[in-house]
């Protein structure tokens, strides 16, 4: 093991040994090298005559660039576009995102957590978490309504075993009891569990109520108190798109500093929150389980995260970080974001009104939804995959089949005035097949 990894592990062992136990074998071996990047950072501060360290080309005191590209980006200073961004992301962006998280999540006030580290959007953050905390045979607790890419990221790539629980009760609430039962069983079998909380949920579009959220947190704490180490990840990809009665903030704030055996990790990003999917700008934030400030643990986790970023992709794109900074600093940002939120909310409420008309009751039920991009139909008479193909071939309508009964509809990309027609076509497709 590299001496730098040993040093970070000793730091964890001294200040919270449970976090060290949570790490996978790879996670224990991770470190941030004192190599080119470290030497270049030192040179940036001190090399006032010549800086011959990092592998970029310079010209006229700044980065070299092609004018045909800069012509399209003339609003931005070349130094904020072309050089490599720091391995943990631009400091200003990290600070602005931290301020945003605190503003939008009151339960994070007064809590101790790391500065967000920039990732190449949410999927990259999930991959980092998988590599750091999940090894072959480790258990990952997830609802049965889950984003399919979790299986590839954590199962195929990390060798983890996904332990599913029913998402909803028979009456339509979030099944906290089922979640707790699976978590308890994992605790008894493994002594360690990784929990992934994705709200608003993809594919169901559901966010728990405040009471359900508190019950989830209470269940995690109770299992941790029994002696189980828990990595609690909040996948907040669709954060802020809360339309009806539900939590309006991430569970990360309530999980942070909750118990020494709980490590809370927040994954979020500008991707969907700010409607910039192609920018691929996300964040990973850690909160140690101890109630007091525990900087050494957070520092060690940050360095290990920077190490795996350095190993896998070197660093995240610079231009998109600059673009997000400009958006967050804009005086029009909040107003414009609210305008788009109202459009999305209108589509969600219209979808619910159409589905509640009674017109389609013989063809399907629908799962509860109150947030996010999606909702799911539970088909009664036809196979979801057959219906998906039929809708494409005959009507030019696309949807996603989840399993034999469930069809996911992204109302996020359907104009409000077209939602009635969309479900009428889906209904006709069902009648065709039936």
Image (tube, rainbow, N blue to C red):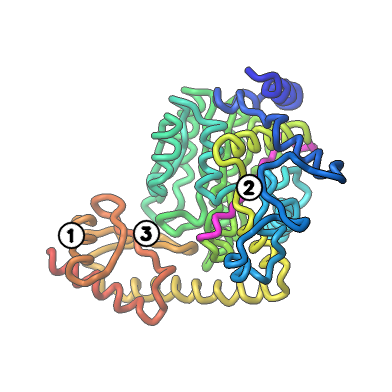
Q: Nearer the viewer, residue 20 or 132?
A: 132
Categorize mark 2 by other alpha carbons within 10 Å: few (<14), some (14-19), many (20+): many
Q: Is residue 160 above or below residue 390?
A: above
Q: Position of residue 100 (x, y in %)?
A: 70, 59
- Viewer-nearest of labels 2 and 1? 2
Q: Position of residue 150 (x, y in %)?
A: 43, 43
Q: Residue at x 72, y 64 (%)?
A: 77
Answer with mark 2 or mark 1, whichever residue precedes in sequence. 2
Q: Which residue is mark 1?
A: 381
Q: Is residue 148 above or below residue 80?
A: above
- Viewer-nearest of labels 3 and 2? 2
**Element type where label 2 sits in the image:** helix
**Element type where label 1 sits in the image:** loop
Q: Which mark is residue 367?
A: 3
Between the residue at mark 3 and the residue at mark 2, the CA separation in whole angstroms equals 25 Å
Q: Is residue 106 visible?
A: no
| 110 left or right, relative to 174 | right
Please report the bounds of the magenta region as a residue range: 278-293
Q: Position of residue 407 (x, y in %)?
A: 30, 58
2 and 1 marks in contact (CB < 8 Å): no
Between the residue at mark 1 and the residue at mark 3, the CA separation in whole angstroms equals 16 Å
Q: Position of residue 62 (x, y in %)?
A: 74, 56
Categorize mark 3 by other alpha carbons within 10 Å: few (<14), some (14-19), many (20+): some
Q: Nearer the viewer, residue 318 or 63?
A: 63
């Amino acid at each position: 093991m590299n001496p730098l990894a040993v040093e970070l592990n000793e730091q964890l062992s001294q200040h919270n040994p449970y976090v060290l136990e949570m790490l996978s074998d790879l996670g224990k071996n991770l470190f941030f090298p004192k190599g080119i990047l470290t030497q270049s950072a030192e040179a940036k501060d001190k090399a006032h005559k010549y800086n011959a360290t990092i592998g970029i080309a310079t010209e006229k005191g700044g980065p070299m660039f092609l004018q045909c590209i800069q012509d399209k980006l003339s609003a931005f200073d070349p130094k904020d576009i072309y050089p490599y961004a720091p391995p943990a992301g631009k400091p200003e962006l990290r600070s602005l995102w931290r301020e945003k998280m605190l503003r939008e999540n009151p339960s994070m006030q007064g809590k101790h957590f790391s500065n967000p580290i920039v990732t190449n959007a949410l999927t990259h953050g999930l991959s980092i978490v998988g590599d750091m905390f999940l090894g072959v045979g480790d258990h990952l607790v997830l609802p049965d309504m889950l984003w399919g890419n979790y299986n590839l990221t954590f199962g195929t790539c990390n060798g983890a075993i996904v332990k599913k629980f029913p998402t909803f009760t028979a009456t339509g609430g979030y099944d906290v009891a089922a979640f707790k039962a699976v978590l308890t069983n994992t605790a008894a079998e493994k002594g360690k569990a990784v929990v992934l909380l994705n709200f608003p949920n993809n594919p169901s579009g559901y966010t728990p109520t405040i009471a359900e959220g508190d019950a989830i947190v209470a269940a995690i704490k109770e299992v941790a108190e029994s002696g189980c180490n828990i990595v609690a990840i909040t996948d907040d990809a669709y954060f802020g798109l809360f339309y009806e009665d539900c939590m309006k903030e991430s569970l990360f704030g309530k999980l942070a500093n909750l118990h020494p055996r709980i490590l809370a990790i927040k994954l979020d990003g500008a991707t969907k929150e700010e409607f910039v999917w192609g920018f691929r700008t996300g964040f990973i934030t850690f909160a140690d389980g101890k109630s007091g400030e525990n900087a050494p643990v957070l520092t060690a986790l940050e360095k290990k995260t920077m190490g795996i970023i350095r190993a896998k992709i070197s660093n995240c794109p610079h231009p998109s970080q600059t673009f997000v900074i400009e958006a967050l600093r804009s005086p029009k940002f909040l107003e414009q974001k609210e305008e788009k939120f109202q459009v999305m909310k209108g589509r969600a409420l219209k979808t619910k009104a159409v589905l509640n008309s009674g017109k389609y009751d013989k063809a399907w039920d629908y799962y509860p939804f109150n947030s996010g991009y999606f909702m799911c139909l539970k088909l009664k008479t036809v196979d979801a995959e057959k219906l998906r193909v039929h809708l494409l071939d005959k009507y030019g309508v696309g949807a996603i089949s989840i399993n034999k009964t469930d069809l996911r509809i992204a109302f996020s990309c359907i104009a409000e005035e077209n939602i009635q027609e969309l479900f009428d076509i889906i209904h006709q497709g069902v009648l065709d097949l039936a």
